[in-house]
Amino acid sequence: MPHDGEWAATTKGEATAARIRAVALDQFSQLGFERVTMGGIAKAARVSQPALHYHFEDKAHLWRSAMLGLRAVIQEEERLIEAAADAPALTQLRVAMRLFLQISWKHPALGRIVALEGMAGGERLEWLDRHLLGPRNRRLAAIAAEAVAAGDLLPYPPEQVVVTLQTAAVGVINLAPMMRTTFDCDVAAGREVHDEMILEAVLGGFLTEKGRRAREEVQ
């Protein structure tokens, strides 16, 4: 990927470009970069291949543009976490996880992309780290480290705490098709129970006795 930074579609036909990006994001998140074709995206977006290439020069360009569509979502999450910056680290972490759950339900493609590219590694993951994920995840790890230092979280590696929490949060969402096939259940219908399980059982499992008392005081 020789280019860095933001890739925007041409200004002409922005509604068409937006539709292409939405289709591309869905396909990239479900099939992975290698299995997606420009022809398949053009067909799903109901545009000709010349029209597709008018807006996006190649698949890598389209992938980056689709990913950047998630940047506003992450920036809003970061703004809300910043608003809680004066709160204790444990409170900040709970706020961050609640926001992460909200985003994951509303934008499931984000969690799927992270899972696919996080396993694959390479240039696309490095690009995501620079432009979307890295600053947020490093900030969350710093918050978790503060909570460990305050005696509220068990002394596990903060970066592993963050990734474990995030992976647990999106697991059921990412595997919704399997949940329907195997258990005949609608995961969205159980959203409240799922979120409580993540916040109380999973995050709660990392708490020290001091952290549990602090949690009870604010509930």
Image (cartoon, rainbow, N blue to C red):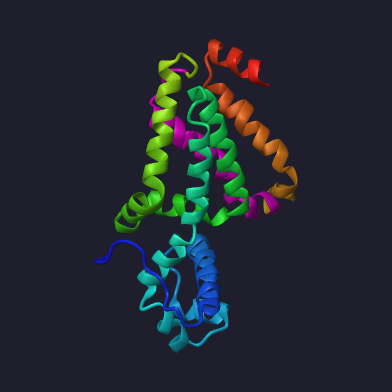
Residue 143 at x, y percent in the picture: 43, 28
Residue 182 in the image: above or below residue 46: above
Asked if the magenta segment contains residue 200, the reply would be no
Residue segment shown in magenta: 154-180
Q: Quadrant of residue 101?
A: top right
Q: Name the residue at the left extreme.
A: 2
- The rendered magenta stretch, by its main secondary structure, is classed as helix
Q: Position of residue 167 (x, y in %)?
A: 51, 40
Using the rendered image of the protein, determine whether residue 182 is visible from the camera's viewpoint: yes
| Residue at 33% from the left image edge and 56% from the top image edge | 127
Q: Nearer the viewer, residue 111 or 2?
A: 2
Left or right: 174, with 163 as reference point: right
> What residue do we see at 65% from left, 32% from top?
197
Q: Quadrant of residue 6?
A: bottom left
Instruction: Judge left or right: residue 217 versus residue 32.
Output: right
Of 167 and 106, nearer the camera is 106
Q: Is residue 208 above or below residue 170?
A: above
Q: Position of residue 191 (x, y in %)?
A: 70, 43
Q: Residue at x 57, y 77 (%)?
A: 44
In which quadrant is the N terminus drawn?
Answer: bottom left
Q: Residue at x 42, y 67 (%)?
A: 65
Picture quarter with the C terminus: top right
Residue 189 point in image, percent of width and height:
75, 47
